[in-house]
Amino acid sequence: MTTVVRLDGVRKEFGGTTALDGVSLSVEGGEAVAVMGPSGCGKSTLLNMIAGLDRPTAGRVEVHDEDLGALSETGLALFRRRRIGMVFQFFNLLDDLSALDNVALAAQLMGIRAAQARRRALELFDELGIADRRNAYPASLSGGERQRVAVARALMNRPALLLADEPTGALDSRAGEQVMDLLLDLNQIGQTLLLVTHDTAMAERCASRVVELADGRVVA
Amino acid sequence: MSAVWRAARAAVRRRRMQTFVIGLVVLCSTATIVVALGLLDASTGPFDRAFAHQRGAHVIATYDTQNPATSAPGVEAVAGPFPEVVLDVPADGGPIWATGPLTVVGRADPAGPVDRVDVWVGRWATGADEIVVTAQPPPDRADADRFGGDILGKKVSVPGRPVLTIVGVAYSLGNTADAWVSPATMAALGPSGSQVLYRFRHAADRAEVDAAIASVPRDGLTGTQSYLTRKAEVAAGPGTMLPFLVVFGVLGLVVAVLIVANVVSGAVISGFRHIGVLKAIGFTPRQVVLVYLVMVSVPSAAGAVLGTALGTVAARPLLAGAFQGLGFGARVDTGLWVPLTGALGVPVLVALVALVPARLAHRLSAAEAISAGSAPKAGRGLRVQRALSGTRLPRAVSLGLGLPFARPGRTALTMAALLLGVTTVTFAGGLATSVIRFGDAVDRADAVQAQVRPSNPDFGRVSTDRTDPQVEALLRGLPGTVYVTADLTLPLTVAGHRDPVQVDFLRGDATTLGYQAELTEGRWMAAPGEVVAASKALKNLGLRVGDTIRLTYDGREAPVTIVGRTMEAGIAGGDLFADWSVFTAIAPSYHLVNHEVMYSVRVQPGTSVESYLASVRAADPGLYAWSAVSGLGNTYTVSVVTISVVFSLMIGTVAALSVFNTVLLNVRERRRDLGMLKSIGMTPRQVVAMMVTSMAVLGLLVAVAGIPAGIAAHRLILPMVGRTAKIDLPAAMFHVWNPGALALMALAGVAIAVLGALLPSRTAARLPIAEVLHNE
């Protein structure tokens, strides 16, 4: 089994506030890890470090043997494009694009032709059970459907690591259940998963390991 | 009120960039508005203003006595009598433009109650044998100094009179004299009469001026001149350039107002979420509107005041240069209403523009306003977006192409500003080319560089014994000579017409004189019985190209056919060009004196005109040779080209600011989208490409409309200028665009858009993803 994520003494400060304080962590390939903790404990900050969305004040972040600290902004963008899939609490879909085009976008940014990208997107729509909603626009989709579209977009480039930040936080319980099932299914077919949640039920159901944070430190 | 003020102040502080942009846009727009209004104001009756400033003479009365009476009813001011004499300065008796009949007036100083003469180089003639000559000042001070360096100290000599030294150059808009000397020098020159300059209380129109002329003392009166004649001359000369200036003024005004509307409405719309928050905490709809009005009014007031100051400072030298170049003098007074409109009118405009979206905020419920920007909303231009996402274009580019459809109102305003920017650049580019071609056609600098005339022995100069053909042969044999054309100007009558016409009889290389470039109809002469006429002469005679006329001289007639029409008059202001054979046919017994013939010479490229002129004088000291290339250049050209360039830059800058603001607002509104795009791997370069593309496409689209609009404005205005000047303009002045130039114009639109978009696009590329995505 390969190590997908390795954090070593990661520290992050915002002004005078310490969000992460010497976090060391590793995630193996095929694992599903849930990061839990109270609000403000640094969960999302940790996720941002791993996704290359932000840089640590100190320490080292490696994903797929790539030292993120050594990468330029463009290098980080290319890293995210190739290695990371992200699912957000509030979906972050483009209102002007159809569901299919929102998903295809991730591949098109890599230079893949529109037709090919749409074919791959349609496969994902089929797999995620939302093929009939492919031409709908975000405003006409339910919360659960939007999150499935967001998951499809995250999987578009076959990422080594799927990161989910409170993926059910903006969904009703039924839609939340569906999304949890989906993430579980993905992990069962080998997708490495790191999710941030404060929902214990979700962590228990989806994750093979739980990391608890408190005041920016790993406590369990 | 204090809650409103506090909320507005907090909004101003929180949106520093937005506040700065509003202030900057209002500053630049106000400066443009002030310059544009100044231009429009100064263009309204510039002659009357300059004439009033110089306290020009409404009537110039000339007497054959030294002490005529000077009282007349209705007189506001009177100056004189000033002694005067007409000196006939020979061609080699002074600088080329101070030769011929020169009306010289004796005046102790240039000031006085009437006709305050502007001495723009050197000083007034106060000493013995000093003279101040008249010339229109160039628009540029450096040119004036250079001209002064060339002219001051030169001599003006007339046989039998004291040799005069030029000590200054002055300009009287009323054209009261060709030169001035001190009263003592005038006594030595021997005055033949005097002039009295009158300003009347009522002299606004022809009837009032006629009444004024009738009221001046008649004893010894030899002639009168109305200032309306001079006004008409100016209207047909430099005044022809005014329509150009007015177009620039109007364009500047419209662009500036549009951009203020775009920026301010965008600022208010982008603050809808804040409006919701204010309502939720208890602000009344009226208070919310007030908060937004105050928020945009603070930077706009500061921008308007600074912009007015900047515009006033910038307008002064610009307008002074332009109007001085056009002959209206350096002092251009604009009304107080111009800066007042800038300082007070623009903030009012801003408030009115802000009121429209603010009233929308007034109607919006708190919940609706708060959800603006966060809740998913129905997209816009969905078909276009779908089509674009299926293209083979790089995705960043196709996303950029789709962005303008998301905010059609903002896009329309931005496009309107860009459209006017491109129209202005196109119009200005075409205008500059036309004016330069006009100057070149009039100067014919490429066609003729030297002119030669045998000196007149009557003026006591060294003359030549060479006959006309011998002079021509001598010139043709000189090193550096390429072409020589002999020209004899004679007044002839046209059968059936009372007034004589001036005919230029040409011999030698007449086709190389450069007048073909001035042809507005027909062709150049190809056979002896053909003539080419000046457009003004054809209008006066009521003739057309193709007509056959009979030239009459001393009882003999020669039928000739008009085969072409030129833009302006001939070599010495002549009406017709004819072949020399017509002259020999119609006046076989004419005793031709050699100094009646002038020779126009084209020298080999690279040959120094000065050294060529020296070689002519060395070959025969009896030949007077001078440069045909004006040292001053065409001051009209300089004035109009300067205005074109300055306004193009100003309007281009303001249009670019509009783009800057649009992209800034788009970035602000799409922060979340941009964060998401970056999170899924959009590189900083792709972000810049997307944002810049979104504006570059507008630049390209407006080029499609703006270039034809600029060409149309050019086509509309240019004939107006021709009609005012009573000349037909040749096709070369209209056909100033070629594919290369049009491509450059199109690029100008794209360049304005790209330049405006670049900075905020880079800001977008640097957006912190984590911060953007987690500030939900």
Image (cartoon, coloured by chain):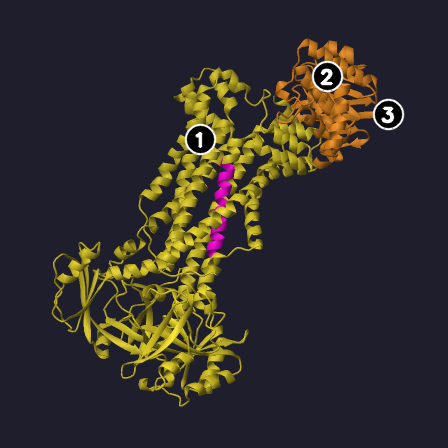
Chain colours: A orange, B yellow
Say if the magenta span includes residue B154. Answer: no
Residue type of the residue flagged with mark 3: Thr
Magenta segment boundaries in residue numbering: B413-432
On residue B296, the disc is 1
Q: Are marks 2 and 3 in contact (CB under 8 Å)?
A: no
Residue shown at 33% from the left, 69% from the top: B168
Along the horizontal axis of the image, is A147 left or right of B447? right
What percent of the width, then of the height, locates residue B296?
A: 44, 31
Say if the magenta span includes residue B416. Answer: yes
Along the horizontal axis of the image, is B129 left or right of A197? left
Are tags 2 and 1 found on a single chain?
A: no
Q: Quadrant of the N terminus of chain B?
A: top left
Per the image, label 3 sits on a secondary structure element best described as loop
On residue A213, the disc is 2
Q: Nearer the viewer, residue B459 or A132?
A: A132
Q: Is residue A216 visible?
A: no
On residue A2, the disc is 3
Q: CA distance from mark 2 to mark 3?
A: 24 Å
Residue type of the residue flagged with mark 2: Leu
What percent of the width, then of the height, locates residue B69?
A: 12, 67
